[in-house]
Image (cartoon, rainbow, N blue to C red):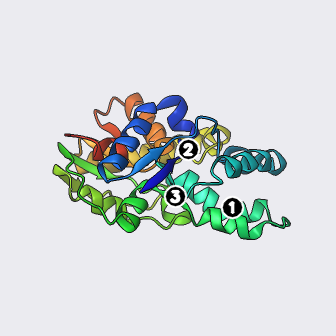
């Protein structure tokens, strides 16, 4: 199966290894991965900041870049959820609603694609550790994603997954929220870090590196020795 990979801005600029591991995982699942080097952003940052006209220009490019893609897979529930939920608002008065809906139906977060399209949950990954999983707000509330990452992690040999207390509460990142409301954001991150410590986990896993960056920063500041790993990094471990 041929899939087109979309690499989110956070991953492209700060955590490129997660992109390479996404390719590794998809190929392991039997996919032929295509990467359009002209791709940029999905349009979410400008949209969330209220600059809808600027966001629409970026979205136009996204639609053109992936016009011929049957499946668009993203290692980010945030970006995938944005395209699926908000492109309809951005193009509310556009005449190409049918084209937009078709694009939205072709966009998948990585774990959703593996489990529900490829019907694969065991990729032969091995990682000897005690881990806990963070549900990002975008994954839970926009993409409606919860069981698929856990299903994949349950098949990772050597990994003991411990559920995080209060796991549906925001970590405090929220994009520009963490900049505009720094004290609140930091306090929310501290609360999340406390729950992580209480699990005794060595590793924190999530589908969204923006959350992992925020929580990881809090843990680094407090000298908490817990490693942050994107789901793709875990699924690419051991082979």
Q: Percent from the top left, x then y, of residue 69?
A: 57, 55
State the image quarter where residue 83 is shown: bottom right
* Residue 161 visible to an observer of this rendering: yes
Q: CA distance from mark 3 to mark 2?
A: 35 Å
Label 1 secondary element: helix
Please name the residue shown 34% across and 51% down the image.
Answer: 195
Q: Which residue is mark 3?
A: 71
Residue 154 relative to residue 58: left or right: left
Which of pointers 3 and 2 indicates the residue nearer the eye? Answer: 3
Please name the residue shown 25% across and 51% down the image.
Answer: 199
Residue 224 relative to residue 16: left or right: left
Q: Which residue is mark 1?
A: 86
State the image quarter where residue 179 is shown: top right
* Residue 129 visible to an observer of this rendering: no
Are there few (<14), some (14-19), or many (20+) residues within 10 Å of tag 1? some
Mark 3 vs 2: CB contact within 8 A: no
Label 2 secondary element: helix
Mark 1 vs 3: CB contact within 8 A: no
Q: Percent from the top left, x then y, of residue 170?
A: 50, 55
| Mark toward the start of the polypeptide (1 vs 3) | 3
Q: Which residue is mark 2?
A: 185
* 126 is higher (above) or lower (below) than 103: above
Are there few (<14), some (14-19), or many (20+) residues within 10 Å of tag 3? some
Please name the residue shown 31% across and 53% down the image.
Answer: 29
Q: Percent from the top left, x then y, of residue 107?
A: 55, 59
Q: Percent from the top left, x then y, of residue 181?
A: 64, 42
| Mark toward the start of the polypeptide (2 vs 1) | 1
């Amino acid at each position: 199966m041929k899939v087109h990979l979309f690499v989110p801005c956070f991953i492209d600029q700060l955590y490129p290894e997660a992109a390479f591991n996404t390719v590794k995982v998809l190929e392991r699942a039997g996919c032929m991965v295509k990467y359009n080097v002209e791709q940029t952003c999905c349009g979410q940052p400008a949209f969330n900041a209220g600059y809808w006209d600027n966001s629409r220009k970026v979205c136009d490019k996204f639609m053109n870049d992936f016009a011929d893609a049957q499946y668009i897979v993203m290692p980010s529930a945030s970006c995938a959820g944005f395209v699926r939920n908000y492109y309809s608002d951005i193009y509310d008065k556009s005449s190409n609603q049918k084209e937009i809906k078709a694009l939205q139906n072709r966009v998948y977060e990585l774990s959703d694609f593996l489990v529900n399209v490829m019907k694969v949950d065991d990729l032969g990954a091995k990682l000897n550790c005690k881990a806990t999983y963070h549900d990002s707000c975008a994954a839970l509330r926009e993409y409606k994603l919860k069981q698929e990452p856990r299903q994949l992690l349950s098949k990772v040999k050597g990994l003991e997954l411990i559920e995080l207390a209060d796991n549906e509460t925001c970590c405090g990142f929220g994009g520009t929220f963490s900049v505009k409301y720094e004290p609140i954001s930091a306090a929310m991150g501290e609360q999340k870090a406390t729950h992580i410590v209480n699990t005794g986990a060595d590793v924190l896993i999530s589908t969204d590196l923006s959350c992992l960056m925020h929580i990881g920063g809090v843990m680094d500041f407090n000298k908490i020795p817990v490693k942050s790993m994107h789901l793709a990094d875990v699924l690419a471990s051991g082979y």
